Image: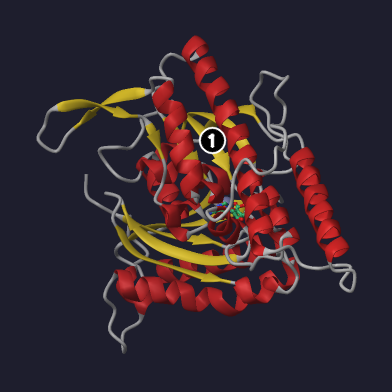
Amino acid sequence: PEPFCVLGIETSCDDTAAAVVRSDGTILAEHVVRQDEIHAAHGGVVPGLARDAHRAAIDRVIEWVLRRAFHVGESDDPMAVAAPHLAAVATTMGPGLEICLRVGFHAARQTVERLRALQPASSSRLPLFLSMHHLEAHCLVARRIPPHEPPFPFLVLLASGGHCMLLLARDLGQYSILGGTLDDSIGEAYDKTARLLGLEWGGGGGPALERLAREGNPHAFSFSVPLRQRRDCNFSFAGLKTAVRLAIEKCRRRAADIDEAQPLVQLNRQAAADIAASFQYVAVKHLEERLSLALQWCQAHEPNVRSVVVAGGVAANATVRERLRAVARQAGWTRRCPQPDGSMRDEESVLFPPPRLCTDNGVMVAWAGVERVRRCGDIVGEPDMEDIEVA
Ligand code: KG4
Ligand code: ZN
């Protein structure tokens, strides 16, 4: 089939992102404008500020990816050059922050209208306007690169700031939830721990916590692994968060006893690193145990599932990747994969999108759009503002 391109737009939280992806998986252009400096002082995303920043950035982000993708000269109109190549404009409709989603929706609709106006009315190639589910986009981006793309059905561990769940991806738009979080997501737990430790804010608190944890002893504190007594696929991070807060307070008090002049002394770097490493050890242990249960469940009930995808912002973490890979290996999860020389070989069947495609981005939305265009029969109507799904 003839290749086509999709423009993807993502504004569900604090990243203003867009990308153009070709149907063979090639990323023609991608761009993300982050809002870290805006939210850093608040220790978390402030929706009103996020919306204002999206509004300020979105047009320029879209123009930038169109210029880059289609080599548009300075004096040419990027919409006019892009119009014949774009089969669809896909935008995230949720879940996310409503006022932020609206910014992406408006920009996407405006772009579609301009692209359509640039085509002759008789054209059979008017670009589609597609609404994307944020979580589906996180899951599907793992299918972008042949020959490793997992075929349906596959298992997904989605670990992000907004969600923590185990899903069975049966087909496009068809997901069964095997388990979700009873309280916080794992990304929130990383963010809260990072905030308590006073770490810098950049792509959330996770990246700074991951760096600090490398200097610490993961067994310095023994936090208990959540939900050990429940053999299901649910998650819980609230108890761990409280245990971490108490440990930090205790360390502070101990430090204050030594230096009475400063009742609220900062933890020394080693103590902070030990807490970070011990938190991460247990948080990832919880993921390991739940993934392991889900793998067993699949083996018993869904024998056609042969691959696991780990997606969402927390899947960018190197420790998470390494330890979940080991879980799949121990469970014997491999599948036959075609090799470049044409032969077949058993490969480990746990897949992680590249780290930069784990955190929110435009590529995942564009790719989810590519998958939808390929199945045009599924498209029933255009997105409507009323359909925006609030997180
Ligand atoms: O998928 P994402 O970008 O947004 C949501 O859909 O929620 O995930 C953001 C979350 C944040 O909580 C952030 O702290 C976390 O992913 N995160 C990480 C890392 N990079 C991002 N957590 C741990 N280690 C990382 N390297
Ligand atoms: Zn996300």
In this view of the protein, can residue 372 be seen by the observer?
Answer: no
Which residue is rendered at x = 28% and y = 71% of the image? 70
Across and down, in percent, residue 365 comes to: 47, 53
Which residue is rendered at x = 26% and y = 41% of the image? 146
Indicate if the residue with disc 1 has its beta carbon within 8 Å of ligand 1: no
Across and down, in percent, residue 139 comes to: 48, 41
The answer to which of 249 and 373 lies nearer the viewer is 249
The answer to which of 246 and 368 lies nearer the viewer is 246
- 49 up-or-down from 318: above or below: below
Which residue is rendered at x = 83% and y = 48% of the image? 246
Give the farthest residue toward the top: 300
Tell me if 70 is positioned left or right of 225 in this view. Answer: left
Q: Residue 199 is drawn in which quadrant?
A: bottom right
Q: Residue 97 is drawn in which quadrant?
A: bottom right
- 265 up-or-down from 230: above or below: below
What residue type is disc 1 on?
Answer: Leu
The answer to which of 224 and 233 lies nearer the viewer is 224
Tell me if 216 is positioned left or right of 62 in this view. Answer: right
Tell me if 163 is positioned left or right of 366 in this view. Answer: right
